[in-house]
Amino acid sequence: MNASGHEWIERIRIPADHPSLPGHFPGEPVIAGVILLDRLAALLEREGCGVIKRIAAVKFRAPLLPEEEAELQVAVTAGQVRFRVLRNAGILASGEAELA
């Protein structure tokens, strides 16, 4: 992970044996959006930014498949979080949250 002030980039990859995948969707699994949000929350806590109080907006534009590499980009300013999940420069998800 690279950090510059309150901005981070973290590579993410959800393994094919993740426990959420059998029900999401059988035969054609995709990573649930909540798993991506969980990765965001874990990064914020690990970096000492606190916990997410409220997700103000989130848009999932394209699915992330098991074993695919993606990039989680996060910027924190005055208790506000902006984030994007990218794969090959294409946006998979983006949003804003407030920290407690």
Image (cartoon, helix red, strand yellow):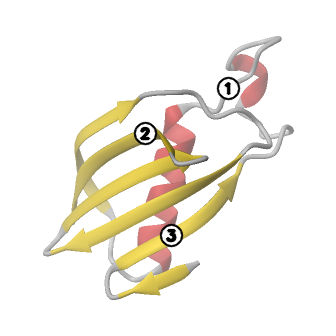
Q: What residue type is labelled 3?
A: Ile
Element on which disc 3 rests: strand
Q: In this view, does 15 lie to the left or right of 47?
A: right
Q: Earlier in the sequence, mark 2 or mark 1?
A: 1
State the residue position of label 2: 93
Q: Residue visible at 84% across and 38% down?
A: 16
Instruction: Residue at 33%, 77% (x, y): give it.
Output: 49
N-terminal label among 1 and 3 = 3
Whole-percent x, y for residue 70 in the image: 62, 51
Where residue 12 appears, as percent x and y from the top left, is 65, 57
Q: Look at label 1 and name its amino acid.
A: Val
**Mark carried by residue 69:** none
| Mark 3 / mark 2, whichever is N-terminal | 3
Q: Distance between the residues labelled 3 and 2?
A: 14 Å
> CB atoms at circles 2 and 1 under 8 Å apart?
no
Q: Is residue 62 positioned above or below 19 on the image?
A: above
Residue at the limit of the structure toward the front, as seen here: 89
Cα–Cα span, label 2 and label 1: 14 Å
Q: Nearer the viewer, residue 6 or 48?
A: 6
For disc 1, the neighbor class at 10 Å (few under 14, some 14 to 19, many from 20) is many
The residue sitting at 51% across, 58% down in the picture is: 72
Q: How far apart are marks 1 and 3 (CA)?
A: 22 Å
The residue located at (18%, 74%) in the rendering is: 77
Q: Which residue has dot 1 on it?
A: 30
Of residue 50 and residue 10, the one placed in the foreground of this image is 10
Q: Is mark 2 on a helix, strand or loop?
A: strand
User: Label 3: which residue?
Assistant: 9
